Image: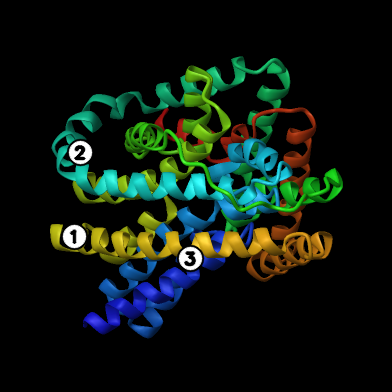
Amino acid sequence: MLFEILLSITFGILAGIITGLIPGIHINLICSILLIILPKYNLDIKLSICFIISMAITHTFLDTIPSIFLGAPDPNVCELILPAHKMLLKGNGFFAYILTCTGSLISLLFCIFSLYFFIKIIKIIDISIKNYIWIILILIIIFIIFSNKNKIECIKIYLISGILGLICFNINLEQPLFHLLSGLFGISGLLISIYSKNEIPEQNNECNFKKIIKPSTFATIMGFIAAFLPGFGTSQAAFLINKLTKINDEFYLILIGALSTSNMIFSTLTLLELNKARNGAILAVKEIAGQINFNIFLLMILVIIISGSIACIIGINISKKISNYIKKINYTKLIISIIILIIIISFILDNFMGVLIIIISTAIGIYCNLKSVPRNLMLGCINLQVILFFL
């Protein structure tokens, strides 16, 4: 059984590399495919869980690479793009990734060592806030909107994204989130990256580590809070921290990496203690296993440690190679190839309706960028539905 578990972890890491590096190909899509083939091939439950968790954790270590080097953010790290791209244009793209990766790694270690404490308080916190989740989410959205100068545009982007999300989740699509997120955050970011025509300089691959533990610890606590709030993403948590504390770019990059990983880990804890799934990967685990027991939870934690450690090494090596060869890559052809791949997958999943949603959501994503509106407001495509549900 040990060999099979290690093999599942290996395949999960490979899948996480694919979802992390290709904008628009999210872990939710792979989880959905797994849920379809699981009954047909009678796949082992534990092995399936090992695959999903290793993929999800690997994704959190690698999903910042396309944001840094291509300008196409994952929705969970959409607020990363500006500080990361600034560092890339200064020749410090590799260091930008090292900061996010270090944040993820330290957050992983902090989460593991603090699990016992969070297990003790998780139910108390859940009882205290569960009736006020919709109020908290509304207050967060209001804060984000009113912290921007262009408040009318912020409201427009949030409502348009939210309405599009409501429509997509009610027209019987196979993968509504794939089309929404691929357009809002993936293709729109890639197209903007093409037309910005910034000259990317040689990357120096030097690293200067300072003040890393503090933001990672702080972000881990925020990741724990975010795990309680459906519709409250990593990018929104990072945005709030940034507005409240005015952190610098290096701190912000560490924060993004730490938040992404800690949120995923604590989501496994909410499944154990509360039987609630707060993201697509954990929802897939819940669909497969139902209520998990403590032994399954310990297996998941072991998988997180193994896959996170390996993903850290893989991510550093991949980002270093990209940094070395980015000047030799035909940037435009690479981005166009990724866009074509996303559109083909969209058509396979939901025919012309999927492609139509991608076109509409891409237009919203581009408009959001042109109006300098925080991209995390486009998460209204999920957030608004959650608020209406709790109302």
- Residue beneath disc 2: 118
Q: CA distance from mark 1 to mark 2?
A: 15 Å
**Image marks 2 and 3: residues in contact by CB distance under 8 Å:** no
Which amino acid, by three-letter code, is at mark 3?
Answer: Ile
Q: Nearer the viewer, mark 2 or mark 3?
A: 3
Q: Secondary structure at mark 1?
A: helix
Q: Residues within 10 Å of mark 1 (few under 14, many from 20)?
A: few
Residue 156: give x, y in percent of width and height: 70, 26
Kindly tell me whether residue 306 is visible in this rendering.
yes
**Image marks 1 and 3: residues in contact by CB distance under 8 Å:** no
Classify residue 351 as left or right of residue 278. right
From the viewer's perspective, is residue 67 above or below residue 323?
above
The residue shown at (75%, 63%) is 352
Which amino acid, by three-letter code, is at mark 1?
Answer: Leu
Residue 255: give x, y in percent of width and height: 46, 37
Using the image as rendered, state which of residue 323 and residue 48 is in the foreground. Answer: 323
Using the image as rendered, state which of residue 221 and residue 229 is in the foreground. Answer: 221
From the viewer's perspective, is residue 68 above or below residue 221?
below
Which amino acid, by three-letter code, is at mark 2?
Answer: Phe
The residue shown at (78%, 50%) is 200
Quick one: quadrant of the C terminus? top left
Residue 137: give x, y in percent of width and height: 45, 26
Q: Nearer the viewer, mark 1 or mark 3?
A: 3
N-terminal-most mark, 1 or 2: 2
Q: CA distance from mark 2 to mark 3?
A: 30 Å
Q: CA distance from mark 1 to mark 3?
A: 24 Å
